[in-house]
Each structure stands twice: as C-alpha cells, then as structure tokens.
Image: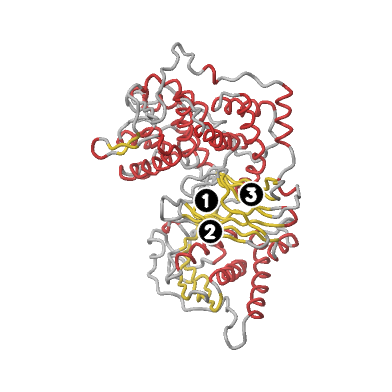
Amino acid sequence: MSGPAVTSDRVGGEIVDRAYALAYFLHPDHDRALRLTSAALAKLKLAVRAQSRRIYYQPARADRRRSLRIRGRRTKVALTDIQILQRLILVESERFERELEADHRATFEDSLVWFVKHVVRIVLKRNSLHTCVAITRLLHDYPTAEAQDIYGALIQDPDRVPDDAYFRSVKRRLLRELTERFAERIRVVTVERGEMRLESLESAGAWSEYLSETLVRCTPWETSCALQTSYRLREHAVEAFGSASGHPDDEHRVELRRMHALVHPRCWRLLCHGLDLEPPDRHESVPRFTDIDPEPPAEGGHAMRHRRTRELDEETRANIEQGASAPRGPGRRPNGEYVRITVDGAVVATLTRDLRSIAGLELGEGRELIEVWRGTPESEVLQGVHLIEPANGEPGLLRFELEAGELLDVILEPSPDPAVGCRLRARWSTRGYLDSLRRIVSPRGGASKRAFWATVAAGSLAVSAVVFVLSAPPLERSAPQPGKPVAPPVVDAGATRGGIFEPLDALRLSDVGRVHVDPIAGPRGEAVAHLLRRGLMALEIFEISDQRDSVDAVLKGSATGDAECSLQLQLVDAAGRTLWSFEGASATCDQLVELAMASLAVETER
C-alpha cells in the first residue's frame, strides 16, 4: 500500500460506486443505501482535513549518542481518503440499523451482517491485537493459546505477544461494547472454566456465506494479501508483517497488512493453514439474537444475491458527486446562534453565547464520530468531523475552525471507569492572541516550527502575566511568577528511564524529543497531569509517551491548593539533571499550566 493520501479530490464515479455497493450490502434498499452513501460522502472532506492536520507532524526522538533528532514511530494509523470513506459508511450505517431495529423490521440476516460489521468496525480503529482477539475469540471459537500463536506469527516478536490474561481482558472489553450496541438482543453466557462467551447458534455453518461475505466487504480498502499458500509460519516469517526501517509511517502500513490477513477470509484461512490449525469453517460462531428466530438461508450460493447491487445510473451518480462537493465547513457562514456537538449522531452539548464552555460529559465506551454543527434551529451547517481514535490513557485535543474566526476546542479525557469510556470538555471562543500571532508569524519561508511556537509562546507569556497582574486585588494576591528557579530534585542516575540509556553530558532542552508526564503530587495532581499532557500536545514540540522507559526526559512536580493553585514543575533527564523548571502560585491550575507551557516553549528555543 502506498503512503496515506489526504485529499478527497478523488471523489468520482468509481469511488461513489464502491461506497454505494457497501451501503447497499448493509441495507439492501435503494433509497436507504443512497441516503447512507450521501451522508458518508458529505462528511468525507471534513474527516480527511482533520486527519491531514495530524499526519503533517513527524514524530521524532533524540539520539543521545549522536546528538541528533531522528524519526520516531507514529502511534496512530493514518488512513487513505477511501479508507476514511469506508469507515464513515460503517459508522453512519448504525443510525439506519437502529431505526429498523426499533420498528422490528430487521431480519436475522440483517442483524448478522450488522453484528459482523460492528465487530470489525470497533477493532479496525484500534490495532491488530484487538482484531486478532475479535476474529479468533468472537467470530470463531479458537482457544486462547491458538489465538496467541496467530498473533505471534503476525507480530514476529515473542516479547510483544501478551499473556492469556491480557487476551481475556481485551475480549471482555469487546464484549462490553457489543452488548452496549445490541443491548438485550444478544446474551453473554458463562461456559466451562468460567469463560464468558456470546450465546451462539448450533448451526453456524449454514450462515458461513454471510459471515465470509461481510468480512470481505469490511476488509480495509486498498490493502492486499501478504500470504501465499506455501508459507509455513512456524518455520518462516513473512517479510510483509515486519517493520524495521524506522520510518514513522511504516508501522501503520504493517498494521493494516496484519489486520487485512485476519479479516479477509482467504488470508485468514491461509494464516490458520500456515500454523497447522483447524480450518476456520470448523470454528465459526454465529450469535443467537433473542428477538428473531433464524430462517434457513437459501442454498446453492444464492443467499447473498439480493445484497449485490446493480450499477448506479449516470444521473444518480452525478447527484451524489454534486452533493459531496458542495461547500461545507468554515467556508459557509450561517448566522449561527449556537454550536452543537454530536457523538455518533446523538447531541451531547449545545453551546450558546451565554454558555461558552461545558465539562464533565461522559460519552461511554466505543464512541467513534464527533460532529460539530453551527447555526439556528431552522438551519444548521456541518462545520467539522472527527473520527475518534482510542485514547491510550492520554487526553486528546481537537480544534475545530468555525466561520468568522471562531474556534471550538474539544478535549477528550480517558476515564478509569470502563463504562464511562471518556469524558468530554468543550470551549467555544473567538481566535485569541495566539492565533493572531500565528497568522502574523507564519512558519513559512524557512522558519522552524519550534521558532514559530517560541515567538507565539513569548507573546502568550507576556500577555498572560500582564492580565494576571492587572486583575489581582491589592495586598490579597500576587501575579504568578513563571520561570522562577527551583532546586533540582535528587534523582539517582538512570532512575528516570530505568537506567537503560547512558546519559549525555551535553543534553540540552532542545535535544529532547520524547517526554513522559509523571503523576503529579498533590490533591489536584491527576487533573494537572491531564492539563500538562494537553498543553504539551498543543505545543507540538515534543512527542508525548505513556511509556516511561522510552523517553528522553520526564516531567514531574506537585500541585497544591484549590481555587488558587501552587504549581512546581521540573523536566529532568535520565541522570536526574533539571533541564527546565517552573514555579507559580496564586492563580487557577489552568492559568498556571498555560504559563508553564509558554515558559517551556521559550526556553526550548534558547
């Protein structure tokens, strides 16, 4: 597969036909399939634009021995525009599915197709491990040991194959998301040794064609088979599943190949054969739906015929293309009274001129699509689309550019409660001084991104300090003091990163590529740690890692107080040397973190 494309200019006849064919397979009704196709295509450009902003950033880390910054591994998969379109169709389909289910118009074969589609949908946004668990343990009943063998053959590194307890935890997470989607229509039962499984039909083989065809349709588009019949996977590794070049885009390409091998039925059979496992058709598992009694499918290979659509006529195709190319987003300026945020089609927040921010919204696990609408009750315009990626324990910052220079910042914060999934905070505002400076001090013409952000941060630091000083009541509170030196912590050499790297005597702050945020001490520590991760990501100077033993420096500190916070921070290297420090007080935690990030950006450029 070639590198990820981030343009949606390819929307044309072939793309429309392919999108409609998938929509019709999921919903074999011409009008419904047209509406589904149009809805997905209408959001494609905005979804591609959101991803393109993310993949322009090249992850990097510092090579301490050579004092160089080298490319790191990208942690999130970047999709081509047609793969984004495929995912949008899978996501948008659920709204139509729920309408039919609510009216009791869904047949057993409809429900089976949607179930298999949903299983693939929730794992493809993650990684090959989740895909392996779903295929081997949910859509088939292979034992955990054989699932580990399959994943080991794909990952080609025994140290990266989790133990059986982790496989079970991934399976429980996926079961939780499936039962949330299908509610009481499916039932989880306990079998031998206390294993949790979905109640399944005894005659799964009769529905093998439906299972296979749905998996073919849901296999990531523009990916190819890497397996051949001659492979003996216990003896030989498959080169296409390995990633050794170090290029940041290589890992996600390899992950897509691994996921293709698991989802596509032909590759899946070859994978099992290459490991001397029983063929998949002996282990297929079809869920029992509590509200529908299955009727035997047609025999002779005709069961799926009614889901294979005819070609679109030229007029219909042209209408779809015209609708997909209509201007959307910041280019259109409705006289909007509010900004509405929806997640998977459900309204979660409405911001108005009187209510500019909202926090603490619990989204639930497995949410996928955030949409931002701007307008009035009579007329709304779609302004932004973002496909949610798994948070991996880190907060995510999304910025939507609205019309007339307005911004909507959305923060997704992981929750330790699996039922909550993540929490959402949002703030609707006009462009501040940071964005004004960004337009004036553009990083074009050879200026580096770090130099640009240092200039922006210097302005932020100065303006914030003045604001805090002027707003402080006399004799009651003083302005924060960013950049005030603090005593460096006493840290054993090598303790910061587990002692696996030799420290560089001349390591500078500008050499740091990857940073880990330690737990922050104090009653506000968890909240401040989230703010710090969000601030570091917004600076785009460092790559943030949740693995402490694979970074160049660790950010640690303490936060005390409630309404008025006191904050102390140190960024230390592997030898315990303080590369940067900050101390501030008599302001909110948000304000102090903003000042700390501004100070850090300025110091990084020195």
Instruction: Please name the amino acid that badge 1 sits on.
Output: Gly
Q: Residue 327, located in which quarter of the rendered image?
A: top right
Q: Nearer the viewer, mark 3 or mark 1?
A: 3
Instruction: Report which residue position mark 3 lands on.
Output: 372
Residue 522 location (% of width, % of height): 42, 72
Instruction: Please name the amino acid that badge 3 sits on.
Output: Val
- Do callouts 3 and 1 mark residues in contact (Cβ within 8 Å)? no
| Residue 51 vertical placement versus 412 (above, below) | above
**Other residues around mark 2 within 10 Å, as few (<14) / some (14–19) / many (≥20):** many
Instruction: Please name the amino acid that badge 2 sits on.
Output: Gly
Residue 413 location (% of width, % of height): 50, 56
Foreground residue, 295 or 154? 295
Q: How far apart are labels 2 and 1 at the CA level?
A: 9 Å
Looking at marks 3 and 1 on the same chain, the residue that comes earlier in the sequence is marked by 1
Label 3 secondary element: strand
Instruction: Report which residue position mark 2 lands on.
Output: 513
Q: Is residue 485 left or right of residue 297?
A: right
Foreground residue, 384 or 283? 384
Looking at marks 2 and 3 on the same chain, the residue that comes earlier in the sequence is marked by 3
- Do callouts 2 and 1 mark residues in contact (Cβ within 8 Å)? yes
Residue 407 location (% of width, % of height): 67, 57
Farthest residue toward the bottom? 475
Task: State how many labels appear.
Answer: 3
Label 1 secondary element: loop
Residue 272 location (% of width, % of height): 37, 27
Foreground residue, 347 or 230? 347
